[in-house]
């Protein structure tokens, strides 16, 4: 596990470490340097237990539901039939998360749980790209404060001169949308949307393409 965390830090990633004890308890003690690196690199040390809580095996099992809950999906590399990893996978399944497994040899005792998960429907993967492709549409690109400020200025420029009553519609038209879609997105009554879209079309703010509208 230490090597996994250090690998994430080396490539500029961030780690959330979920503890089975209070955040003031570093367990095991030799993990102190890794704790510090996680925090220094913008990660976090979290726990549902109050300060001073000592670690024990049951607490580590319980915290696994938080590990899976924080994740888009869970990759199981190795897991014995009964293990902490299998518990995490069980929680992930209950939470509706995607389970990915690297297949293992029948002779490998630590691969029994992994192969069993694949039999039950977990996705067999061999390359990191197979997981990234699955979540590509769900992972939002992080932007800097400067980029966010630029986006805000661009939006303000676009809205300059747009009547207040049209702005809720104009703000969401970043792709072709039907009247129904506009009504759902803005919460504006369908009849009112029809009326506004007609006026916006007459004022050449939008153009109708098929049954959808786009910004002119």
Image: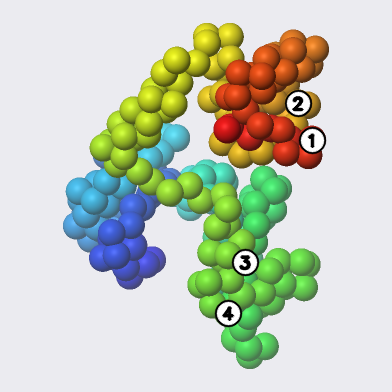
Residue 105 image position (x, y, % from top left): 63, 88
- The residue at the point 80 percent across, 12 percent down is 191
**Residue 102 vertical placement versus 23 (above, below):** below
Residue 75 visible? The answer is no
Residue at 65 percent of width and 52 percent of height: 97
Q: Nearer the viewer, residue 48 or 149?
A: 149
Residue that carries the numbered disc 2 in the rendered image: 179
| Mark 3 / mark 1, whichever is N-terminal | 3
Check whether the beta carbons of the residues at disc 2 and disc 1 lie within 8 A of each other: yes
Residue sitting at 56 percent across and 45 percent down?
69
Instruction: Find disc 1 in the rendering and name its residue.
Output: 211
Q: Are marks 3 and 4 in contact (CB under 8 Å)?
A: no
Earlier residue among tags 3 and 4: 3
Q: Is residue 166 above or below residue 141?
A: above
Q: Are marks 1 and 4 in contact (CB under 8 Å)?
A: no
Q: Identify the disc placed on residue 126.
A: 4
Q: Is residue 146 left or right of residue 177?
A: left
Q: How many marks?
A: 4
Q: Which mark is residue 100?
A: 3
Q: Secondary structure at mark 1?
A: loop
Counting other residues with Cα less than 10 Å from the Cα at mark 4, is it few (<14), some (14-19), or many (20 or more)? few
Nearer the observer, 163 or 204: 204
Q: SS for tag 3?
A: strand
């Amino acid at each position: 596990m230490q090597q996994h965390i250090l690998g994430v830090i080396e490539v500029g990633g961030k780690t959330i470490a979920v503890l089975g004890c209070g955040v003031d308890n570093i367990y095991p003690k030799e993990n102190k340097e890794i704790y510090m690196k996680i925090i220094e690199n913008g990660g976090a040390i979290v726990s549902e237990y109050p300060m001073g809580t000592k670690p024990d095996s049951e607490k580590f099992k319980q915290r696994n539901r938080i590990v899976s809950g924080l994740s888009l999906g869970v990759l199981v590399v190795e897991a014995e039939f009964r293990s902490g990893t299998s518990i995490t996978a069980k929680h992930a399944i209950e939470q509706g998360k995607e389970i990915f497994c690297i297949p293992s040899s029948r002779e490998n005792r630590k691969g029994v749980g992994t192969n069993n998960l694949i039999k039950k429907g977990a996705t067999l993967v061999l390359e990191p790209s197979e997981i990234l492709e699955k979540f590509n549409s769900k992972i939002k690109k992080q932007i800097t404060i400067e980029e966010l400020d630029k986006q805000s200025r661009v939006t303000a420029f676009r809205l300059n001169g747009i009547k207040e009553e049209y702005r809720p519609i104009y703000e969401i038209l970043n792709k072709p949308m039907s009247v129904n879609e506009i009504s759902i997105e803005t919460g504006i009554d369908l009849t009112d949307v029809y009326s506004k879209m007609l006026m916006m079309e007459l004022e050449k703010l939008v153009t109708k393409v098929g049954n959808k509208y786009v910004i002119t």
